[in-house]
Image (cartoon, rainbow, N blue to C red):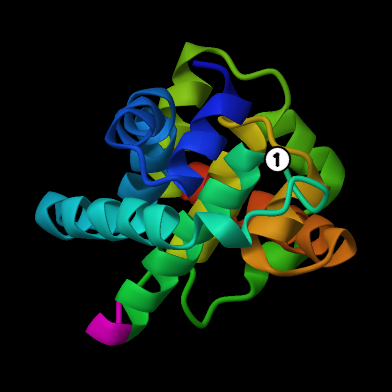
Amino acid sequence: MEETEIIAGLRKQSPQAQQQALERYGRMVWAQVARMISPVEDAEEVYQDVFIKVFQHINTYDAERSTFKTWLLRIAYNECITHLRRKRQRMIYLDDGDNSYEAITEAEVEETLGRPNQEVVQLIRAAIHHLPPDEQAIITMFYYDEMSLKEIAFVTQSIPTTIASRLSRTRKKLCKIINTLRT
């Protein structure tokens, strides 16, 4: 099924279209949810909530505002944020209360994150888990999902310049965390 056929089928509440949507986009949505939510049981619950919301609100999808993929990721992101707010668990991250990352220059960030080798890739994977969920989401959408700043802004209900600023700040935090993990 083509994406337009899936969307049309979802609007008709076709079980076949719902299955196709799950098969085509499920892995991408799961990746987004799993990066923001733990434990796995909670992530599974949020994942299900995402597709329930997609199936219930498919008529609000507007192809002129975003791609279907971006619309799905926006729903996933919002469901994750809602879940995290409900849980209201205060998590302590490596950089809490420490703004020393602000002194890191873009050149230092590029030196650390620029052309990652095997060691750096492993350090980045480890460092990401020390970031708050919203920053994890921005980093992974940009690097792993290769989304543009405009797409990330749509997903997070922000503007591209704000995302660029948050991405820069988060990259500096990652650099600081990586340097901490190396010592």
In this picture, residue 153 sits left or right of residue 46: right
Is 4 drawn above or below residue 140 in the view shown? Answer: above
Q: In the rendered image, which residue does mark 1 sit on?
A: 67
Kindly indicate the quadrant of the structure image that contains residue 181: top left
Q: Is residue 150 above or below residue 29?
A: below
Residue at left 40%, top 66%? 79
Front in this rendered view, residue 124 or 1 = 1
Viewer-nearest residue: 168 or 38: 38
Displayed quadrant of residue 43: bottom left
Give the percent coordinates (x, y) of residue 180: 46, 49
Residue lying at 62% horizontally and 29% vertically, measured from the top left: 4
The magenta-colored residue range is: 86-91
Please, which residue is most extreme toward the left here? Answer: 41
- Give the x, y percent position of residue 97: 51, 83
Viewer can see residue 173? yes
Residue situated in front as seen by the camera: 112 or 93: 93
